[in-house]
Image (spheres, rainbow, N blue to C red):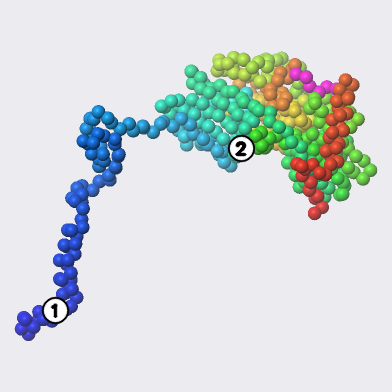
Amino acid sequence: MPILKQILFVPCKYVVVVITLPFILIAHWLYTPEAASLPQHPTTVINLDFPASVESTIAIDTPTELPVQKETAIIQPLSNKSEDKVVIRQGDMLSVLFDSYNLGQTTLRNILSADESLLALETLRPGQILYFRYQENTPQLEEMELYKHSGHRIVYRRSADGSFTYETFIKEGKWHNERISGMVEGSFYLSAQRAGLTKTETAIVTRIFQDQLDFSRAIRKGDKFQIVRSVQTIDGQSTGKTRIDSARIQRRTHEHTAFLFDDGRYYDKQGKSLARAFMRTPLAKSYRVSSSFNPRRIHPVTGRVAPHNGVDFATPTGTKVLSISDGVVTRIGNHPFAGRYIDIQHGGQYKTRYLHLHKMLVRRGDSISRGQAIALSGNSGRSTGPHLHFELHIHGQPVDPMKAKIPISRSVPKRHKDSFTKKVVAQTFLLDTTTQLTEIVINNSE
């Protein structure tokens, strides 16, 4: 076939491509900005207030030295980090948090050393807050704050030698009454929790009436109970702290009452004590006091000033440690400095703590009787030798257990009888009322 005829039979698609290509090239040349010929680097535009003779906008693709002008822009650098805020979540561990923020385990150990007499960092709870505060222009931790709630803060501060001290800030807040009532269905223990008491509060109520009631035999289905509980709030928010102000259990033919008085003990409406008197020491016989209560003591191991919030008894390892009164075990732990320890809550305002133990004989949540063996003394934690460290706390503050006023009488003293009677009348009204604003009433039979 002749060449001309072959050209005439070129497919249409090739003809379209040949005709369109020149138009595409022309359009690309016309609409491409001149800046396209420059190297393609990220561009930062900074507006500077220069005189009119200088362009007000400079494009910078790499760091360059700007021309010196009589008026220059002041660009403030970002301030160095001065604080980190950490909200505690379930399962958080202090050692892991310190690693995450590059604070170092040595710093943590120094803080725990300061916390030995307090044990505030032993059990972090979800919702509590840690603040890490740093030395200016350095990553060094200068201060750490544990924010339990708005009424309880603890600040740990670095000293010149690298050790830490602590300071506690406590606000009393306000206490509001709640009335909780119910009917026994099954066991009292489960019925009280269904009504709204916590396990610890239920154990306290059980402990209050232990000498008047056999809860496994005397309590029957249909028996009623009423509890007045006070809840602490600060700035309108609950701190989580509660106390049992009064309690009443109504059986078919008997009524049992308990009223918390100003001395921290529970009495029936006649003023007779429902708890046995406190023991002065937690030991069956006398042992030498090797270190007394001293808020400004020089620590025998570190040589630094560190509060000694209790009394040390020179007991051989394996000596039985006794609870000084009836109570409930609220905490058991093993601290790197305090060693194995036990906390026991005794009714309203009293708490005892036992440190450097060898072996625990009770578990958290157990109800404890006066004089019951709770542990064997030892030499755990940071210690110079076998001994028992014993603390007594009243209203959350450590006091000298050898000198503090502890419950020793069996009934309300005559000089306080009028005051006690007034309290009984007020609390009985709260136990009876059904119109209280903060009342919580749950019928367990539903």
- Look at the image and tell me in which quarter the N terminus lies: bottom left
Left-right relation of 64 to 313? left
- Secondary structure beneath disc 2? loop
Q: Which residue is mark 1?
A: 10
> Observer-nearest residue: 200 or 147?
147
Q: Which residues are magenta?
A: 404-412
**Coordinates of residue 381 in the picture (x, y in percent):** 60, 25
* Magenta span contains residue 69: no
At label 2, which amino acid type do we have? Arg
CA–CA distance in space, label 1 to label 2: 83 Å
**Coordinates of residue 63 in the picture (x, y in percent):** 25, 37
Q: Nearer the viewer, mark 1 or mark 2?
A: 1
If you read the primary sequence from the N terminus, does the residue marked by circle 1 or circle 2 appear first?
Answer: 1
Indicate which disc residue 125 carries.
2
Left-right relation of 145 to 27? right
* Magenta span contains residue 407: yes
- Secondary structure beneath disc 1? loop
